């Protein structure tokens, strides 16, 4: 019995190393058990409760921090287990610094998942951000999160980062001066995305290029011209140019002068004007807001009728078909009235009557 009592007191004495090691092992096992229970029960219950809310934002935030929370439970268990062991102060200082650094990394990990995840996408949709700008902002925020986490971890280990930050500032200034054109293109891309003068698929006209926008990035915009060539335009150039977006026009304009001969009688001319105006007012493809048909001017070789209207369609092929149909019907009106279309001509008058070829060949003439 004395030997058993001695062994029992040796085994379960508080200062016994094996007893402390056993307790530390039990703490680690309980930690893994708690992690499994948290994953299977608690976290799933929280997710089910969040799914009943009106928005999916809270669920997206929980999913972003799911991985860091699982690792955090294990790290807390390991810290408690090592803290129970009789370790030297220097080792405990290192373990404490590791624990605090791990907490900082886990927090950064959660926010890294949050930025660019489902929650970020929902917020960007609510703010009506352009997809390119949202991706750029996500990458920039993630870079800031990594930089901040790195700086805090370095400070946690007792290093002074003020000199490093000052050096990075000077290096960043030199880098910005060297890459000023690239930065100008990036800021131009941000301005284009915020102002939204055009989108992918729009037909645009600028002093540099005309065509359909095929791709937009933060550095450049690719435009497919009507000759089927691909033109890459730096965003800094587009941001400083006047951009005409033909796709966003509400209707397409038709404006021209119809010249008839000077031999056209006034009643015939007036009848043509009235019939053309009636044609446009009743045509199904003509927009009724503004229709102008007037005898405009006495030109050099014609009497000009000014015709101005808009088609309802914006599609080029449909616009050309409507315009062709209207032109044919205008020709029909002119044929019905016996009016001829004038062509550029010039009349020459001689002060003296010209002699014929025959009279010029006669002797003495």
Image (tube, rainbow, N blue to C red):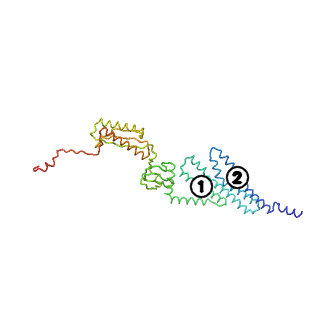
Residue visible at 50% across and 57% down? 182
The secondary structure type at the circle numbered 1 is: helix
Q: Residue tagged by mark 1?
A: 142
Mark 2 or 1 closer to N-term?
A: 2
Q: Residue tagged by mark 2?
A: 40
Crowd class of label 2 (few under 14; some 14 to 19; many from 20; radius 10 Å): few
Residue in front for this viewpoint, 87 or 171 = 87
Q: Answer with left or right where residue 280 lies relative to residue 299.
A: right
Residue visible at 78% across and 61% down? 22
Where 28 falls versus 311 (above or below)?
A: below
Residue in front for this viewpoint, 140 or 313 = 313
Q: Answer with left or right where residue 138 lies relative to residue 206.
A: right
View extreme (top): residue: 267
Q: Answer with left or right where residue 47 lies relative to residue 130.
A: right
View extreme (bottom): residue: 3
Q: Answer with left or right where residue 195 lies relative to residue 59.
A: left
Residue visible at 40% across and 45% down? 321
Residue in front for this viewpoint, 357 or 145 = 357
Give the label, 2 or 1, closer to the camera. 2
User: x%, y% of residue 77?
Assistant: 73, 57
User: x%, y% of residue 55?
Assistant: 62, 45
């Amino acid at each position: 019995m004395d030997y058993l009592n001695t062994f029992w007191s040796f085994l379960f004495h508080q200062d016994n190393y094996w007893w402390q090691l056993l307790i530390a092992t039990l703490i680690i096992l309980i930690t893994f058990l708690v992690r499994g229970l948290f994953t299977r029960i608690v976290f799933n219950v929280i997710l089910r409760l969040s799914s009943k809310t009106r928005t999916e934002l809270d669920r997206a935030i929980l999913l972003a921090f799911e991985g860091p929370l699982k690792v955090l439970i294990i790290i807390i268990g390991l810290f408690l287990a090592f803290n129970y062991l009789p370790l030297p102060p220097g080792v405990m200082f290192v373990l404490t610094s590791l624990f605090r650094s791990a907490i900082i990394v886990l927090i950064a990990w959660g926010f890294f998942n949050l930025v660019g995840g489902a929650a970020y996408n929902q917020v960007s949709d609510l703010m009506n951000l352009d997809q390119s700008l949202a991706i750029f902002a996500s990458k920039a925020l993630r870079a800031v999160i990594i930089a901040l986490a790195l700086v805090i971890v370095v400070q946690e280990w007792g290093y002074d980062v003020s000199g490093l930050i000052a050096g990075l500032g000077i290096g960043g200034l030199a880098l910005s001066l060297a890459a000023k054109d690239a930065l100008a293109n990036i800021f131009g891309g941000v301005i284009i995305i915020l102002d939204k003068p055009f989108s992918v698929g729009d037909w645009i006209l600028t002093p540099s290029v005309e065509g359909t926008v095929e791709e937009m990035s933060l550095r450049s915009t690719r435009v497919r011209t009507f000759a089927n060539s691909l033109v890459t335009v730096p965003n800094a150039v587009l941001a400083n140019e006047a951009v005409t977006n033909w796709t966003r026009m509400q209707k397409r304009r038709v404006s021209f002068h119809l010249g008839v001969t000077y031999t056209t009688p006034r009643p015939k001319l007036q009848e043509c004007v009235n019939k053309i105006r009636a044609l446009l007012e009743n045509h199904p493809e003509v927009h009724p807001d503004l229709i102008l048909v007037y005898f405009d001017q006495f030109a050099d070789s014609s009497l000009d009728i000014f015709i101005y209207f808009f088609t309802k369609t914006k599609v080029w092929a449909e616009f050309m078909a409507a315009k062709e149909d209207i032109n044919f019907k205008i020709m029909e009106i002119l044929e019905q009235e016996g009016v001829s279309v004038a062509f550029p001509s010039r009349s020459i008058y001689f002060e003296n009557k010209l002699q014929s070829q025959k009279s010029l060949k006669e002797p003495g003439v």
